[in-house]
Image: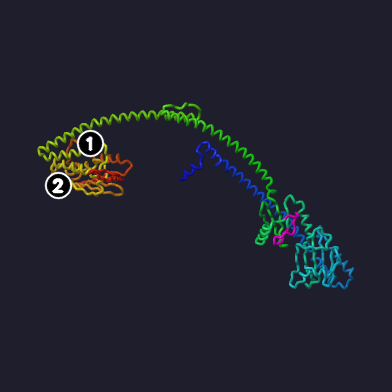
Amino acid sequence: MLTRWFRKITPDTFKNRILLSLLIFILVPIALLFLYNFRETEELLQRNASDKNIEQLEAIKTDLVDLMGLVMKTGMLLEQDSVLRQVMQKPEQYDAINRKKIVENKFAGIENSFFLTGTTVYYTVIDLKGNAYTSYTPAESLNYGKISAEAWVQELKKEGGQRYIWQTNDQSMEIRETKGNRMLSLYEVMRDDGLKPFAYGRFSIDYEQWFTDKTQGSGGEGAYFLLDSGGNTILQSAAGDKVPSDVAALISTAGQSEQDDASSKSITDNQMMYTYSKIEELDGYLVKKVPLSLLFNEVDKQKKRSFAVYSAILILFVLMIYFISSTVTGPLKLLQRKMETTVKSNLKAKLPEQGRGEILALTRSFNSMISDINGLLERLKLEERQKQFVRFQVLLGQMNPHFLLNTLNTIKSIALDKDEDDIYEICIALGKILETTLNTEADLILLKEEIVLIESYMDIQRKRFGHGIELQYELESELEYALIPKFCLQPLVENSLLHGFGQSQREGRIVIRASSRNKLLILEVIDNGIGIEKAKETQTARKRKSIGIQNLRESLELMFKNQPSGLMLESSDEGTRVMMHCPLLLSKPYVKEGHDHVADTNC
């Protein structure tokens, strides 16, 4: 099954097989190696870009956290200033102009301190006595009632509420000095040493402008975003740009489940890489969005150049292999056509020994093979003529046995005319044996036919020596039609008579037994004679040696090559047992015109 499938998918010609092998085992692996290397390079660039983005976001986050710390320090300084606290707690001790001047001077002093350089903090403070103060020039006159009604003041006034509240999207229309519209504000309850509130403050920075300044000039490297805890965009470096909602949701979910050591990470989506860093202080995220094409621009160029060179080398390589294979397959095809012509000319023509290398060696081998085949054919023809001659000699040799058979029939007729019954019966028995001997076309006969030969032989022996040897048969009825080698049992019976009983007049018994086992036919000849050893002691010289056990064994091996067969002999003082086995061949008879015929043979 596997071989048939392999033959279907492989080309028939040698040239195409070379090209297919080149493609599968050389070109495809090289192309896959190219792709693998570029993929590894892209992943390495992506990891490096991610690390760089994380480093940039961490720097921006650190600066933002420093700004938030600056705002908190501002609130703490104002809260701890005793003069400011006195003015807020007892405003009635000062006239309105002096109060405003004192508070504004405190705002300006903190603003001009050494740690507040470079960033402007906008203050809005209201006391509990109906006075409001700002560090900036408001768009309209300060209204304590309006300010105290704002949401941030109401949130701070809640009983049990938070003392510090950060607002990342604080919009203040009162500030005219700011460039951006979004403020980062800290709402704080200002308390005295006894933890008693004396004022409410809002300390704001223009972090939209700060965010723009920090991300300025990064358009070629990507876009920056500030997201809240829900993934909503608060600030972005490029107007109109945004983080997709599914990516924002993924960042929000991942940020809530990750630990601090995994608060910065990169993810990819739709050919974009998003690197985010969580800001714990704001419960938000800084995000940088970079197109992957921007990262892989040089890699893509290198990839195109590499594959262009690879394609050119591939084409040249295929053409070279095609040319080399053609130099081999071309002469082979020519050689094939010449071989076909030689075969059609009855192997009489030889190929011209042209070319060089393997082709020349193949041509010479073919011519040598043609010479050997012609020599073999001549020998076969000679052997066939010799066989015909031997056959003719065999036919001539059969004339003498037929003459003997005809003479035997004449003796039988004379004995019948003169009432010589013994002579007549001996002639009949001898005629059956002689007819079987003359039949040279059959090597196998039925067991029942072999038994007839044994009976004829025993009739002659009884008439000749007058002994009383009893012959018994133990065999299954269906085994009568088992095919066995001709004259395989008769010599064994003859050996039993000669070696077991000799020419004595003693009574004896010879048992012929046939059985089957495991598709084998088991034949046994058992006598109760004196045994082989004693027979050798009393044996006299004979003019003709009887057939030996070894001859029978060799005959079985020749007749049943590569099949189970054999012969075994056991002898003692109580008799001799010869067992022979061979393949079980059953021939089922049928009746036609009053005679038995063999219909088929089962093994």
Q: Nearer the viewer, residue 503 or 389?
A: 389
Secondary structure beneath disc 1?
helix
Q: Nearer the viewer, residue 399 or 214?
A: 399
* Residue 446 % position (x, y): 25, 43
Front residue of 483/88: it is 483
In-front residue for pair 431/130: 431
**Residue 572 in view (yes/no):** no
Judge left or right: residue 66 versus residue 429. Answer: right
Work out whether 594 lies above or below 99: above
Q: Amino acid at mark 1?
A: Leu
- Determine the residue located farthest toward the left in the rendered image: 418
Would residue 195 be found to the left or right of residue 332 on screen?
Answer: right
Q: Residue beneath label 1, please?
A: 438
The answer to whether residue 430 is above or below residue 385 is below
Is residue 140 visible in this depiction of the protein? yes
Q: CA distance from mark 1 to mark 2?
A: 34 Å
Q: Where in the figure is residue 588, as x and y percent of width and height?
A: 27, 46
Q: Is residue 106 left or right of residue 577?
A: right
Q: How is the image coloured?
A: rainbow
Residue range (magenta): 226-241
Which class describes the residues within 10 Å of circle 1: few (<14), some (14-19), or many (20+)? few
Which residue is drawn at the image coordinates 15% and 39% (left, top)?
A: 426
Magenta run includes residue 234 = yes
Q: Quadrant of the C terminus?
A: top left
Q: Confirm whether the magenta stretch covers residue 424.
A: no
Q: Residue 214's mark?
A: none
Q: To which quarter of the image does residue 489 belong? A: top left
Q: Which residue is mark 2?
A: 507
Estimate the x, y position of residue 156 in percent, counting from the top left.
77, 70
Q: Residues within 10 Å of mark 2 (few under 14, many from 20)?
A: few
Residue at the spot 64% in from the left edge and 47% down from the top edge: 41
